[in-house]
Structures are given as C-alpha cells and as structure tokens.
Amino acid sequence: MPLSYEAPGTPPRADPLPAPERAAPRAVPTAAGAPPRRRWGSAWLTGGLVAVLVLLALVSAGVGAYEIPLGEVIGSVQHRLGLGGAALDRVGESVLWNVRLPRVVLALLVGASLGCAGALMQGVFGNPLAEPGVIGISAGAAVGAVAAIGLGLTFFGNWTITACAFVAGLVTVGAVYLLSRNGGKTEVVTLILTGIAVNAFAGALIGLFVFFADSGQVNQITFWQLGSLAQATWPKVLAVLPCALAGLLVAPFYAGKLDLLSLGERPARHLGVDVERLRLALILVVALLTAAAVAVAGIITFVGLLVPHLLRMANGPGHRFLVPGSALAGAVVLVAGDLAARTLAQPAELPLGVLTALLGSPFFFWLLRRTRRKQGGWA
C-alpha cells in the first residue's frame, strides 16, 4: 500500500540507485538548510508553544473546586523559589503544591512523552498513521502494569508497575516491528493490522486479569484502561521523570538521521545511515517514553498521532523542529486536556483517555480519508 512518506512510484529496493541520485542527493529538510522563512516559523512556533504551555500550567494550577487567583499562584511559586511573592494560606498551599502542581507537571511529562514518541514512530516507520496507541504499544504496556497489579508484584517497590509497563511495552514494540516487516520494508497495512491484533490480544489479557482480580485491583485496573491523572503525586512524578527525561533528551539527537530516512531507506543508507540500527535505537526510545507515560497515566491515545501532524502542517516535515516541537505541543495538549477533563463535568471528572479518544478518533478518520484521497486509493 503506497501509504508512506516515500513518493509514489519509488523504484524497487533491489534496483541500483540512479547515478544522478548518488552524485547529488535530494535536499534534506534540516533546520540548518531550511529557508529563513521556515527557520523563523520554527522559532515563532516554539516561542508560542512555550508561552501557551506556561499560561495553561498557571491557569490549570489555579482552576478547580478550590479557586486560586492567577496572581496568587505566581506569588506562591515565586515565594517557594525565593524570588519574592507570598505564601498562600494553609489550605491554599496544600491544594496548590500537593494536588494541582503534581498533576500539572505529570500532564506535562506524559504529554511530552507521547507527542515525542508519536513523531519518532512516524519517522521510524515512514508513514503518517503510526502512533504508539494505534499499533498497540500503549495497550501492551498497560498489560504489564495490569499484570503487576493483578499478580501483586512488588519486587521493585514503587518502581514495579513502571518496570513491568516498560518491559511489556518493549516486547510489544519489538513484536509489532518484526511482524510488520516484509521484504526488508515495514508495510503500513501489516502495521495497522498487527496493531489491531495486539490491541485485541492486550484487551483479552486485561479482561482475564479483571476477571480474577478483587474489587480493589479492579479499580486500579480500570484506571489503566480509561487513562487519568487524578492520582498524580510528587512520588509518581519522580517515578516517571527519569524515563521521560532520558527519552526526551536522546530523541532530538536522531532528528538529522530521521530526515535522511524520510528520503527512503536506500538513499538513507547511501548517505551513511545504518537504518536497522537507527530503527532499533528509536524503537527503544519510543518504548521508554510510552511505557513511562502509560505507567503513571494509563492508556491515553491519539496524542502521539495528532500532535506531529498538526506541527507538520504548520511548519513542514523537518525532524529537527518536529521531534522537540511535538514534545512541547504534546505537553500543551495534555495539560489543556486534563484541565478540560476535571472542569467540564464538575464535580465529576471525565477520564482523560476517553476525552483524547473522543477528539482523536475523528481526526484519525479525517487523516485516513485525506491520505486515501491524496494517494488515489489504497492499491
């Protein structure tokens, strides 16, 4: 199926590379080689996303059942940082620092992880429909977390669920990658169908654990299935922080090679990219980011699919901006989504994963229709 970033009509892989292509490879959309207008666009977008994220974080910290004015939120943060300001009263300090801010920081980390993982997945697989949730990695990681809950595993203490989610996510992403490859190329049809099968299998395993679980475990397992940040605490932030930071810091270093890979596997190899090693390394990074997010927030889908597409439409396909930009925009989306989830139906709270799926599913359908129209069909 011609659903990839490679142009339709790309010659078979076995054919020799045309001489002109060897002598003068196509221009690569890097930041350094990008037109000044696009570089300015990247700078403006980055600045805009940072400003929106800071504003959303401050608003989210103040809005809720216990309202805290924006100025008092800023004053309390300044006071804790030793930059002046003033502390709130005892209740306000407790609500802000023990309830709201851990949740905001966790939303930021999870959103950044999912957004960055989505951009990496689409670059690694070379197609616009790849996303950790769509191809089953989130569900696989959730199986690891649910198994740890259902079996009562505690061998790593507070890190047990995170470790189990990471290992299960790693196994899942490896299985999807191997099963999707055919003739040295990852086919999008096989990728999507493998994701459907993995999601179904993971759902069956989660169902089995629910069947044998007691009521307390059922409540915990339901959390993973619906996705939520309601149980955010500073220890959970510290639990996810190392994995998220490691993945987010490593990912931008592969942006240049992803730009070369977007030209196609064969041209990338001629330009010095070890494609298989690159894919293996980035699959590990994706598993790290996704497992870290799922381990503390449950299954939250479509963030990794939607965010890179929006940025690609706004500023082109260059990964030097797309990878860190997707992390930034993913954080914006999830902080805003969490704010909406806990304020739209007060005093009840909507599951965050349900909210992102409600918004992401129509986008996915629109993307399928748009891609099919541009490609002229699937076959």
Image: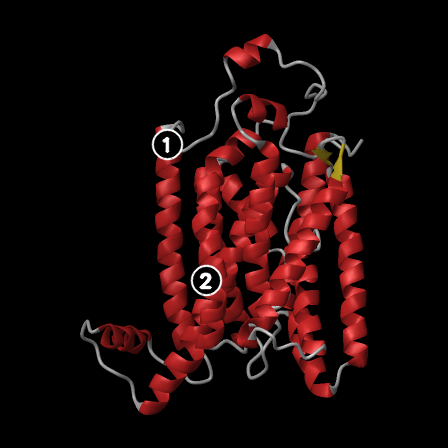
**Could you tell me residue 304's position as x and y percent?**
58, 52
Q: Nearer the viewer, residue 83 or 362?
A: 83
Q: Is residue 306 above or below residue 359?
A: above
The amino acid at mark 1 is: Arg
Q: Is residue 103 above or below residue 375?
A: below
**Could you tell me residue 334's position as x and y percent?**
51, 62
Q: Earlier in the sequence, mark 1 or mark 2?
A: 1
Q: Residues within 10 Å of mark 1 (few under 14, many from 20)?
A: few
Query: In screen coordinates, is 233 left or right of 186?
Result: left
Mark 1 or mark 2: which is in front? 2
The amino acid at mark 2 is: Pro
Secondary structure under the numbered disc 2 in the rendered image? helix
Per the image, the residue denoted by label 2 is 242
Q: Quadrant of the N terminus?
A: top right
Mark 1 and mark 2 residues within 8 Å of each other at the beta carbon: no
Instruction: Please report the residue visible at 41 percent of the width from the left and 65 percent of the height from the top.
Output: 56
Instruction: Please report the residue visible at 62 percent of the width from the left and 72 percent of the height from the top.
Output: 351
**Could you tell me residue 42's position as x and y percent?**
39, 40
What label sits on residue 90 in the rendered view? none
Q: Quadrant of the C terminus?
A: top right
Which residue is most to the top?
19
Per the image, the residue denoted by label 1 is 37
